Image (cartoon, rainbow, N blue to C red):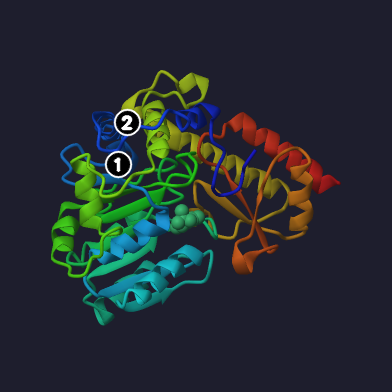
Amino acid sequence: MLWIPGPTQVRPELLQEMARPAIGHRTQAMTDLILRLDPHLPFAFGLEENSSAHPAVHSTSATGLMEASLIGVGPRILCLVNGAFSQRWAEIAQQLGKDVTVLEAPWGEVAPMDSVAQTLRHKGPFHALTYVMSETSTGTLTPPEDIAEVMRDFPDTLVLTDVVSAIAGRAIDFDANGIDFAFAGVQKAFALPPGIAVGCASDRYLQQAKDQPNRGFYLDPVRFIEGHEEQKTPITPAIPHYYALAQQLEDISAGVTLPAADRHLQGAAAWQARFDKHARMQARTIEWARSHDLQLLPKLEHASPCVSCIRSGHVDVPKLIAGVAKHGFTLGNGYGKLKNETFRIGHMGDHTEAGLEDLLRAADEALQA
Ligand SMILES: Cc1ncc(COP(=O)(O)O)c(C=O)c1O
């Protein structure tokens, strides 16, 4: 049972969806399959009722859309960096030849919002700002509401947001949070095998992207978004993943993935109940950590609802990981330079609260041994 911060455990029913007979991607069957996604993607991105945003799917990992997001914007980019994935995004921007300013916070922290505002004011204007909502490497949440508040004073800067380990586990509220481009892979709280990515662009992002030169082909945001909207993907899509995503989106909206008491909920209420389940699993994990005298890496108000990154303290991390493995559970070690100094629990996706109790019992036993 995978409790790493992605890929997460996939329900057998969804794996079966991927074993369906092949279909041609220029057929009515593929059009119908793409159309199955569209009623649900607005819930995932938290679009407002009359939103003009453009949700879409592309056959790439999340990093592909991280790169695509930058292809659609002008050269001056401010990257908020506080972990491995936000660092990757800044590096991609540099590789693409952008004029990059990095505002760095220590891993596990969030840059103070007054520093963000000052950087925008004194080093700007910027065409775009990038930030990672849930830094999977450190379990750190940058609250989108805080960014939105700062960005109200900088309306000409586009807001690009990595929602990889947030979406389907937490509200994104794309419009309310002033986001212009958001993206994620599906191997985190969507609980699907890795291989495709979901993205969403504001209308102004899409219009401005059309004016950018040299957008290439595969990662051109205009091409994949418009292709999705016309049910004509620019490339041969990962069709088995589309089947699994369609089923999972329908199941989430129909309440199928919820605890028994919530299974009557539908639509937005079912998505909210999924987010609430994630919040409860996070709270339980933090309570467990405290009961062992262990601390989270980030401050509580910056803790990700999907990934808890716990300082190792008195724990020998490899021994803990080996101990829970005896019970069939896989836990995540710390990422990169945080290896053995932290460990990570990915309490997201279709994991249940009862399943979390089993994991924590196994961890108790491993710690006692
Ligand atoms: C926050 C975040 N961003 C980006 C990525 C990159 O995703 P992928 O490996 O699917 O390209 C990951 C992967 O774990 C991630 O956690």
Find numbered disc 2 in the image and state the secondary structure of the residue it sits on. Answer: helix
Q: Amino acid at mark 1?
A: Gly
Query: On residue 46, which mark appears?
Result: 1
Amino acid under disc 2: Ala
The residue depicted at 60 percent of the width and 66 percent of the height is 336
Callout 1 touching callout 2 (CB < 8 Å): no
In depth, the one of 116 and 166 nearer the eye is 166
Question: Separation of disc 1 and disc 2 at Cα?
Answer: 9 Å
Where is residue 348? Give x, y as percent.
52, 41
Q: Is residue 131 left or right of residue 56?
A: right
Q: In percent of the image, x 22 and y 61: which residue is there?
A: 152
Horizontal side, residue 317 vs residue 206: left or right:
right
Q: Position of residue 44 (x, y in %)?
A: 34, 40
> Is 141 in front, or is 191?
191
Which residue position holds label 2?
Answer: 268
Nearer to us in this view, 22 or 9: 22
Quarter of the rendering containing residue 242: top left
Q: Which sits in the foreground, 3 or 27? A: 27
**For the residue labelled by badge 1, is the local secondary structure a helix, a strand or a loop?**
loop
Marks 1 and 2, the one that precedes in the sequence:
1
Q: Position of residue 155 (x, y in %)?
A: 18, 64
Q: Is residue 247 visible?
A: yes
Give x and y (percent) for residue 218.
30, 58
Residue at x 77% of width, y 49% of height? 322
